[in-house]
Image (cartoon, helix red, strand yellow):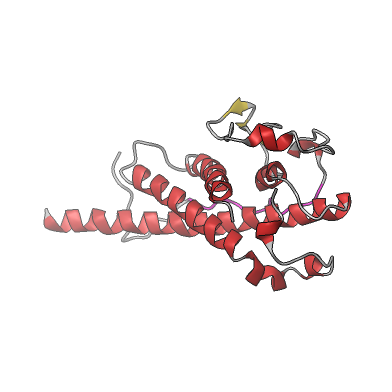
Amino acid sequence: MASELVSETALILSEVMTFEFEKWWNEDKPWYSEAVTEIGSVARQHTYWLLNNFGARYEGYPDLKRLGLPPRFSNLIK
Amino acid sequence: MGLIKKFFSVTKEGIVAKTRKGAEKACTVMLNNAIKLGYMFMEEERMDSFYKQHFHSALIQGRPHWSMDFMGVLYNKGVETECGWWEGYHSELTNMDDFDGNTPEDSSDKVDSSIRFDFSVKLQSDDRPFSE
């Protein structure tokens, strides 16, 4: 899995989630900075794990499996 | 004073922990959507792979106010964010002979956009809000 795909995807996820988080809390809260940092950390960890373990999770996609597509996600991204 | 400090410390940790839980759920949903849409694209176009641009745009597909242009730049309510202009992005797009230029908003593919980003924190009796 290309590391750039992971990092770019994580940044997109962080951007979206931070925006949603800021609907609830703003920068004047004492936990704001730490929480936003946590969001970025979660995005990186989950993106890396989910993309790299997609093959193992492939069984959970019966509709996709039916298509006969290879369970190797790393080969599917150009 | 020590008790107050401890009280605030516990509360802050609790809020961050709940933020993490909400972020984990949101990440899983968005990534699964992107993977699913990628496969759908492959099936419809009879391709054996799909492009990074498809994957990136699928992350936010179906979410109100979010869009992505053909350069991978992310927009919120039409305002450009700092996400995008990835290195090498354009060169990859030049290989997309069949790229139709559709933005996520043009597609009617069904995705799970029902998830609410639950970053609210229910403050319990022992979890009072910080003073402003």
**Quadrant where the C terminus of chain B lies?**
top left
Report whether B130 appears left or right of A53.
left
Residue ranking furthest to the top: B79
In front of the other: B34 or B3: B34
- Corner quadrant of residue A55: bottom right
User: Which residue is rendered at x = 87% and y = 49% of the image?
Assistant: B45
Residue ranking furthest to the left: B1
- Corner quadrant of residue B36: bottom right
- Residue B77: x, y in percent? 63, 30
- Corner quadrant of residue A26: top left
Report whether B93 appears left or right of A67.
left
User: Which residue is rendered at x = 84% and y = 65% of the image?
Assistant: A67
In front of the other: B58 or B8: B58
Residue B117 lies within the magenta run? yes
**Dominant secondary structure of the residues highlighted in magenta in the image:** loop
Start and end of the magenta stretch? B109-119
User: Which residue is rendered at x = 25% and y = 55% of the image?
Assistant: B9
Badge count: 0
Residue B68, visible in the rendered structure: no
Q: In this picture, is A51 found above or below B76?
A: below
- Residue B70: x, y in percent? 71, 32
- Residue B16: x, y in percent? 38, 54
In front of the other: B127 or B27: B27
